[in-house]
Image: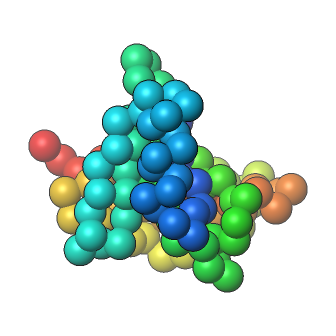
Amino acid sequence: MSHPIVHIELSANNHEEAAKFYTAVFDWQIQSFPEMNYTTFTSGEGGPGGGFNNVSDEYPAGQVVIYINTDNIEASMEKVEANGGQRVSPDIDIPGVGTMAMFKDPTGNTLSLLKPAEM
């Protein structure tokens, strides 16, 4: 199985302001989910989409989280750990999206695995 990048998250204090900027500059399509306090974007042909996290201690300004597709989070996490990475979150189910788990690579970058929901 290939492991393409399927989602990217940018931290933003103001989702509306971020959405306005990326729409004006890159013509990204924006969708707001107020019940989740989350805003998504579609970047266009062939590129992965993403979303805006609220700036917090966990997601400081300037942090970009890349989500990597996997069909088996545990098997991928075992490879992460066997190669010097470290799990930083348990599996988290996102209704209608799938299951994710975050890790740090050996150089300290935080990334996430995403197993898409069965359709």
Tell me if I can see residue 88 in this picture.
no
Front in this rendered view, residue 19 or 77: 19
Image position, residue 21 (x, y; %): 54, 44
24 up-or-down from 70: above or below: above
> Does residue 104 appear left or right of residue 18 in this picture?
right
Residue found at x 45% / y 37%: 23
Is residue 45 in view from this perspective?
yes
- Kindly identify the residue that appears in the image at 19 percent across and 57 percent down: 96
Residue at 34 percent across and 44 percent down: it is: 30
Task: Give the side of residue 48 with respect to residue 59, left or right.
Answer: left
Q: Could you tell me which residue is drawn at 69 percent across and 71 percent down?
A: 60
* Residue sitting farthest toward the right: 107
Q: In the displayed image of the protein, which residue is found farthest to the top?
A: 45
**Quadrant including the N terminus:** top left
Q: How many marks?
A: 0
The colour scheme is rainbow
Q: Position of residue 94 (x, y in %)?
A: 29, 65
Q: Position of residue 105 (x, y in %)?
A: 75, 56
**In-front residue for pair 76/34:** 34
Question: Residue 104's spot in the image, x, y percent?
Answer: 71, 62
Q: Is residue 51 left or right of residue 95?
A: right
Q: Quadrant of residue 62?
A: bottom right
Extreme residue in the bottom direction: 57
Quarter in which the C terminus is drawn:
top left
